[in-house]
Amino acid sequence: MQDIKKILKKYYGYDNFRSGQEDIIKNIISGKDTLGIMPTGAGKSICYQIPAVYFEGTTIVVSPLISLMKDQVDTLNEIGISATYINSSLSPNMFEIIYSNAKLGKYKIIYVAPERLETDSFISLLKDINISQIAIDEAHCVSQWGHDFRTSYRKIAKVIDGLKKRPVVSAFTATATEVVKADIIKLLELKEPFVLITSFDRENLYFSVEKVNDKIKYIENYIKKYKDKSGIIYCATRKRVDEVYNFLNEKGYLVTSYHAGLSENQRTKSQEEFIFDNKNIMVATNAFGMGIDKSNIRYVIHFNMPASMENYYQEAGRAGRDGCESECIILFSRADIVTNKFLIEQGHSGYIERTIEYNKLNSMVDYCNTDKCLRKYILEYFGQLDNEEKCNNCINCNSNLELVDMTIEAKKILSCIKRMGQKYGSSVVTDVLRGSKGAKMTELKFDTLSTYGIMKEYSKDTVREMISYLVSEGYLDVYGTKYPLLKLSETSNNVLFGDEKVFIKRNIQKDYQGNIKEEYIEIDNELFEKLKIIRKELSIKNNIPPFIIFADNSLKEMSIYYPINKEDMLNITGVGEQKYEKYGKYFINLVKEYLLSKNIDVDLAREKFMKVRNGQKDNVKNNIKLESKESTYKITYDMYLLGKSIEEIAKERELAISTIQGHFMKFLEEKWENYENIDDYLFQTQLKKEYIDNIIQVAKQNGIKSFKVIKNKVPEEVSYFDIRYVIWKYGIK
C-alpha cells in the first residue's frame, strides 16, 4: 500500500495534511462513499486527487467550473499527475484525441462538465474506461435549496448506476446547510457515506460591513492604500461593473473587468490578465470567480450586498486561499435590497424558488445589520455552533464602536407596528413614523395613529436602519417573500412592557478604514520581489499562471530559508519533486547570486524558520509566525552574562560562530544593557591594526551599502563580521 503522506510530499510538496483531509482520503481509499463539506481554501481537491493517484484506473471529476478545470489540469500536469478535461471549449479534433487516450488509460484524472453526462458519446466512453472513483465537486448544485442549482447534477446518480461496476463516489462542497447536506446524500445516492464537516471558519479572513455614502470614494481610498495587492470587487450589475472599472482605469490602476455583457474573447482575456498577474484588480459580477484558483487574492470587496450568505461566503472565500491574512468587505446600502429583489423576480419563475431566495436575502440583510460578531453569524448560519462571543478578527469585534441606547426608539417602532396591525413592510412603517404626507397615510388612516410622526426628526435611512437592526436582533419577525412584512416577536414584549434595554453599536468615526493585516512573516522583501520576477518570466515562457509554478507562500519561505540545493528546495512548502526538476534550478541560482551580494546571517534565518516549521506544521492558516529577533538574541545575551565565550554559546545553541557574533553586533547597534562590556568582549579578537585601517579606508571610499564591495578589497582573513564591527566601532557613515 502506498503511503498517502509520501504521495502528498512527492507531488504537492507538503509534509502534512490540513484538517480533515487525511480522514476523507483514507475513507475513499477504503472504498466508502464520502461527503466532504469544507470551506473554500481548505484543500478539497487534494481529497480526491490523492486517491486518484493511489487507485488503479481513472478518476472522473464532475465540475461545473470550466475555468477551474483548466487551472486544475494545468496544475496536475505540472506536478506529474496526468490529467485532462472534457467540456464545450474543446475542438472536435481534441475530443477524438482525448477520448482515444482515455480508453488507453493515459489519464489518472478526467474533469467533465455535468452536462457532458447527458451525451451518448460520453456515456459510451465511460463504459470503456476503468473508473476507480467518481468525484463530484460543488455538490450543492444538486439541491434546489442550495445556490447555483444545476438540473444536470440530478443525472449523476443515474449515470453511476449505469456503469458496469460502481466505483467509490466522493462529493465535496464549501457551503451546505443541513437541508442541502441531506439533499446531496439523497439525490447523489451516496451509499452509507462517511461525512466530514470541517470548521467553516476561515481564520485568516477579516470580515467587515461598511455603511458609507460614497462607495466609489471608499474604493478609491482603499485601492490607493493597497494598490499592489490582488483583489476582486464584485458588483450586482453590469452597469455598476463598468462604472467602477472606468473610474479605476482612468486613475491609472491595473484593473480589468468581467461580466456576461462582454464577448467570450473579452472575458477570457480579462480573466487571464488577472490570473497571470498582469492586472491585479478584477471588477466583476458574480459571473466571475467560480473555480478561480488564484491563491494570492488579498481582498474581496462587494460593492453591493450579495443575495445570500451562500453566495457571499463562496465569493469572499476567494480571498486568502494561501492562508495569509486577507479582507472581505461588504459596502452595504438599502438600495442593495431593492436590487436583489428585482434580480430574484427576474431570475426565478416558481413560487417555491422565489420563497427560498427571499429567505436567503433576509438572512443576508440581518448579517449586514447585526452588531454582533460577523464570523459567529456566518458559522451559525451554516450550522456550526460557536461559543465564542468575539472572534477579534471582524469589524464588529475590533472597531472603535460605542454603545448607543435606542430603547425609546425601539419602543416607538414596535408600538407603531403593533398599531398598524403587523401587516406592513419597513417602508410603510417608516413613512408612518416620520409623518409622511402621502395619500396612503390618509387613505389607511395611519395619520390618526398616536405613533404617526413620532420619529420625524430622523432621516428615512436612519429609521429603516433601526428597523433592520431590530429584525437582526430578533425583536421583529419577517414574513412574506417579495414584500416582507413586519410583526412583533415574543422578545419584543420584554421591550414594550418590561425593562429590557436595546443598545445598538455605532462607529464613533465613519471615515474609511483599511484593515488588511500585515502578515506575521519576516521575509527578505528584496529577495521575494526578485523571486516573483523570475516566476513571472517562467509563467510567460510556459504559458501558465504564476501561482501554478509556485504560490506566494513558497516564495516567502524561500525568502526566509535561502535554499541553495535540492535538499533545501524540497524542504520548502509546495515544492514537490516534479516542480523541483522543472523550476528548482532557476530559483536556486537566483538565491545563490543574491547571497553573494549580501551580508546575510543564513544560519540564524534557518534556525528560526525550522523552529516555526517544526512547531506549526499543522497550522491551518499556513502562516509563518517567526520567533521575534529579540527572543533569540536574548538567549545569547543571557548566556553571555553567565560568562560563556562566543565559542561556547555557539556550540550549546548549535549555531555558527558568525551567527553568535551577529547577535552581539545587534546588541551594540541597538545599545543593549552592558553594551560597552560587550564591546570589550568582542575586541578580544585583536584584529590587526593595519586591517582596521584598511577597512576604514575602503569603507570611506566605497560607502557601506555593500559589505561585499568592502570584503573584496581587504585581506581574505578579514571576515564580514570584522567589517561590520569596525564600521560600528569607528562610526563610519
Image (cartoon, helix red, strand yellow):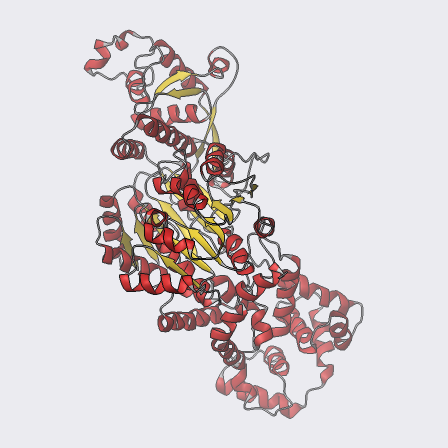
Please give left or right for residue 90 compared with residue 168 in the image: left
Residue closer to the observer: 710 or 465: 465
Q: How many marks?
A: 0
Residue name at image x 46 percent, y 12 percent: 496
Q: In the image, is residue 606 above or below residue 146? A: below
Quadrant for residue 689, please give it.
Answer: bottom right
Q: In the image, is residue 522 above or below residue 730? A: above
Q: Position of residue 723 (x, y in %)?
A: 60, 83
Residue name at image x 32 percent, y 16 percent: 424
Quadrant for residue 369, please give it.
Answer: top left
Residue closer to the observer: 649 or 383: 383
Q: Visible in this render: residue 515?
A: no
Residue name at image x 32 percent, y 35 percent: 333
Q: Position of residue 731 (x, y in %)?
A: 58, 78
Q: Position of residue 54 (x, y in %)?
A: 56, 59
Q: Visible in this render: residue 504?
A: yes
Please give left or right for residue 485 compared with residue 718 in the image: left
Q: Position of residue 363 (x, y in %)?
A: 41, 30
Q: In the image, is residue 372 above or below residue 317? A: above
